[in-house]
Amino acid sequence: MLEALKEKLWKLHLELPKNGLVTWTGGNVSARDPETGLVVIKPSGVMFEDLRPEDHVVVDLDGDIREGTLSPSSDTASHLYIYRHMPHVNGIVHTHSPFATAFAAVNKPIPVYLTAHADEFGGPIPCAGFALIGGEEIGQQVVGHIGSSPAVLLKNHGVFTVGPTATAAVKAAVMVEDVARTVWYALQIGTPDEISPEDVAKLHHRYTYVYGQR
């Protein structure tokens, strides 16, 4: 069931430790199949280097397991809440990447100090409230605070990113940490200047519609 999507998700999961976004077994990626509406997600507590495509668990939007012998991620209910309330989203990533999570620990959003931040996110990266793990509460915080950004910090917890595909969500997770690291370094030197909302909008539009191959 959804073998091609499992293979893709397996490769994307390997990008998390490769980019320094996760430690041990923490963090996960999920993907929704647009045709069936089924969701493929990482099994709970499995080391990334031990993960195989066939280990991924297939669930429906109600959380019923359709395929898989392992228990799905403890964040599954929150992933499913996000999918049910954000129909344009087909990929979700959760990490505790250190620099971004440092901002989450002190309940601070990340302002737009960098053109790369404006390009990718089109505005500040917001910080949602605190929620316990295991139910839909984290998903509720994500949906309630993410706005038009593909990324949101969770107070005292970590990072969630979303995208039209799982690949886009993983890219956003990589970029959140890259931005957070540079901003943290800048704050050690002084107080950086925010880019104006008008220039942020121009940068984001150029990156979205002009940058790259068409």
Image (spheres, helix red, strand yellow):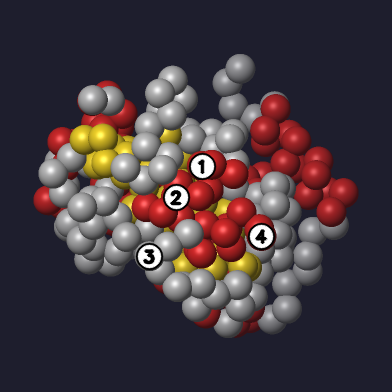
Query: Callout 1, which amino acid?
Result: Tyr
Q: Earlier in the sequence, mark 2 or mark 3?
A: 2
The disc at residue 134 is 3
Label 4 Cα crowd, 10 Å radius (few <14 / some 14-19 / many 20+): some
Residue 63 - label: none
Q: Which residue is mark 1?
A: 83
Q: What secondary structure is marked by label 2?
A: helix
Alpha-carbon span between mark 2 and mark 4: 15 Å
Q: Quadrant of residue 193?
A: bottom right
- Foreground label between 1 and 4: 1
Which image quadrant for residue 95?
Answer: bottom left
Front residue of 109 and 79: 79
Q: Nearer the viewer, mark 4 or mark 3?
A: 3
Q: Residues within 10 Å of mark 1 (few under 14, many from 20)?
A: many
Which residue is the site of mark 4?
145
Is disc 1 placed on a helix, strand or loop? helix
Determine the residue positioned at 66% across, 60% down. 145
